[in-house]
Amino acid sequence: MPSFPRVTDRNAAAPGPDLPSAATRPPPFRPGPWVRTAVAAGLAAATISRRARLGAGAIIGGRVTLALAPSALTGLAAGRQVVLVSGTNGKTTTAHLLAAALRTAGPVAHNATGANMADGAVAALMAEPDAPAAVIEVDELYLASVADAVRPAVVVVLNLTRDQLDRGSEVRAVAAAVGAALAAHPDIVVVANADDPMVVWAVGAAARVVWVATSGRWTGDATACPRCGRTLHRQPSSDGPDWGCGCGLKRPVPQWTARDASAETLGQVIPVRLRLPGTFNVGNAVTALAAAEVLGCDPHVAAVAMSTTSEVAGRYAVTTHRGRQARLLLAKNPAGWAETLHLLDDRPVLLAVNNREADGRDSSWLWDVPFETLTSRRVVASGERAADLGVRLTYAGIDHTTVTDPIAGLDLLPPGPVDVVANYTAFHQIRRRMGAARGGKS
Amino acid sequence: MNEPELTIGVLLPDVLGTYSDAGNALVLAQRARWRGVAASVMPVLADDSPPATCDLYLLGGGEDAAQMFAVEWLAGHPDLVRAMARSAVTFAVCAGLQILGSTLVDDRGQRRDGLGLLDLSTAPGASRSVGELISDCDIPGVGLLTGFENHRGTTTLGPGARPLGRVLSGVGNGARHPGGAVDGAICGRVVATYMHGPALARNPALADHLLQRATGLPFDAAELPDVPDLPALRRAYLSEPRRRRTAMWTARPGRR
């Protein structure tokens, strides 16, 4: 087993972490016979699911194991260095970048498909039983239970914005849940976004925080102070937009700052050359770098490793479909859409919006997305909520064509490079159907 | 000289912006412009001194703490509240409806005064109402209303308020009402509902009614052909009411 570097603490003033070193940490996973049986059953279920082409099999495998042995997650995580990645947007991308960085030191277990509840974590750890490190993305509302089970070394908190109001919770309640999860584990090193007031409020009293200035574009969900409700004051500063409130909540001094194509930390500049588009992905990458450094990775080496990632669970991948080179982009909520629309050039664009359970049933959020920017290009509105999207575009003054079926919508765009922006279930439908069409030809 | 302009004040979008109700302002402004009436949208933030001269005021939905802040903020600006009562037309949604009522119960369970522009009182219900809401609007010519409700408040209308609509599907105000369930309230120049969506995007006839009251101009309440996707949108929401009403708060938060 490769020796994985131990957690290092870059805050000289803070006491050193009492995280398990290679010498003192518990021996590698030696599950009892029942957990072993449960894991074997889960792996079998995953294989059957995959062979039956029902999906990647991760979730069903994790569920079977958890159903048979509810403590399996604790057993599977024991003796490993686990990083949990949470927040509203960028979990999957940040976890992919961090896993790429940590793989320079040894095998890493990672829930790469974005299955981000306990079952997905179990599946990832089962799949890599010998990996000494694990990068697990976790839904914000599952952070507490997963952290209790896996006792992570590091927790990354990216951002907290509105998402699925009809089935989750209002943002402040999510932030409070994240705060409670972190407070229960004072030995965790938290890597958190200094530019998001909701994150700063949530992370609050955590003892050891590495703050990252990510320069996020979206401020729409934290215009009021999350602590006291008054208006936050914002002004530009050299390392991003400064903010603060009369109640005392203010932007912490960041140890890391994301620039256009680099990370700056303690006077040192590390080039960050990504194959993923968008300034928000530089923010994700710099956050991943900060987490990698806490775990003992050389950030220069980590940054080079990240530059090999060109797609993330199908996102950013370019798929050719009937003469259209479609770049697939996923956006799930107003903050995600704002960041994604910002990175588009004036290529023709297909938008697809569903409102299934996993998307959130309430599609009102479309009215907080700045579609007004989609001028001077061909626009097609599609998805099961194509009419809602079309109405929104008309009020935004954007000429468009509306067709429910996204693949039929793609055919309405001229051949050549096009962008496809879709929300969660629409994105997966499009991927599946494009894949099926390609498979059919061969 | 410039022709008169319709001014739409969006009150506290920084505090009551959780449910995208600010879209109502864009709908009103565009529908006015499409008929040749100049219109501007003025966001009024918590730190601003609110103007008392707008033709229309909008109040949206928000989280519990934000709602209490909004009550105090409005009470601190009596000129604005007087304008809402006497000269302007006000459209309030969800938390906005509750704030403008006579009494409400705050997040610590304390009863407190609202602004008193609507004769109604609100208390927390047993469970959260989340899902599609359809009503038959009480305003002549407006027809069926569709929206998405997401609230825990249960609102009882007093004798000085009439409902905005009779509920055909969904919960609405939630309290017992003679003759069956109702949504929203109308009191003089104030119109309120539990519908997000945003409500005026889904219900252009209601938007035109508000514009007509605010300007005195004859806005045709019939759906215009200028929003080609609107008939399909309304057909979809009005023909297949989907209900997911109870206890969403305590339901498994399991997401993707």
Image (tube, coloured by chain):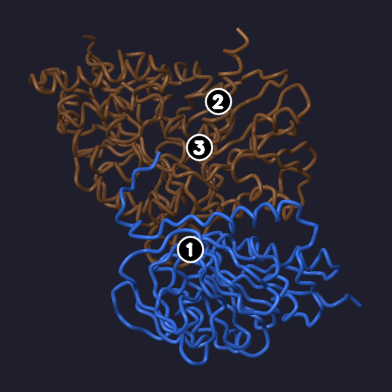
The Cα atoms of the two marked residues, 3 and 1, are separated by 22 Å
Q: Quadrant of the N terminus of chain A?
A: top left
The Cα atoms of the two marked residues, 3 and 2, are separated by 11 Å
Residue A211 makes an appearance in the image: no
Left or right: A260, with B157 as reference point:
right
Q: Residue A431 carries which label?
A: 2
Q: What residue do we see at 55% from left, 70% from top? A: B135
- Decide which of A239, A209 is in the foreground and name it: A209
Residue to which mark 3 is pinned: A424
Residue B95 locus on image (x, y percent): 47, 71
- Which lettered chain is shown in blue? B
Above or below, A292 against A214 in this view is above
**Disc 1 residue type (three-letter):** Glu
Give the crowd class for mark 3: few <14, some 14-19, many >=20 residues within 10 Å: many
- Decide which of A153, A329 is in the foreground and name it: A329
- Decide which of A215, A345 is in the foreground and name it: A345
Give the crowd class for mark 2: few <14, some 14-19, many >=20 residues within 10 Å: some
- In front: label 3 or label 1: 1
Mark with earlier residue (3, 2): 3
Element carrying mark 2: helix
**Disc 2 residue type (three-letter):** Arg
Marked residue chain, label 1 = B
Q: What residue do we see at 55% from left, 62% from top? A: B147
Element carrying mark 3: helix
Residue to which mark 1 is pinned: B149
Quadrant of the rendered image containing residue A22: top left
Residue B163 locus on image (x, y percent): 54, 81
- Which lettered chain is shown in brown? A
Give the crowd class for mark 1: few <14, some 14-19, many >=20 residues within 10 Å: many
Residue A297 locus on image (x, y percent): 34, 20
Above or below, A153 against A53 in this view is below
Residue B224 makes an appearance in the image: yes
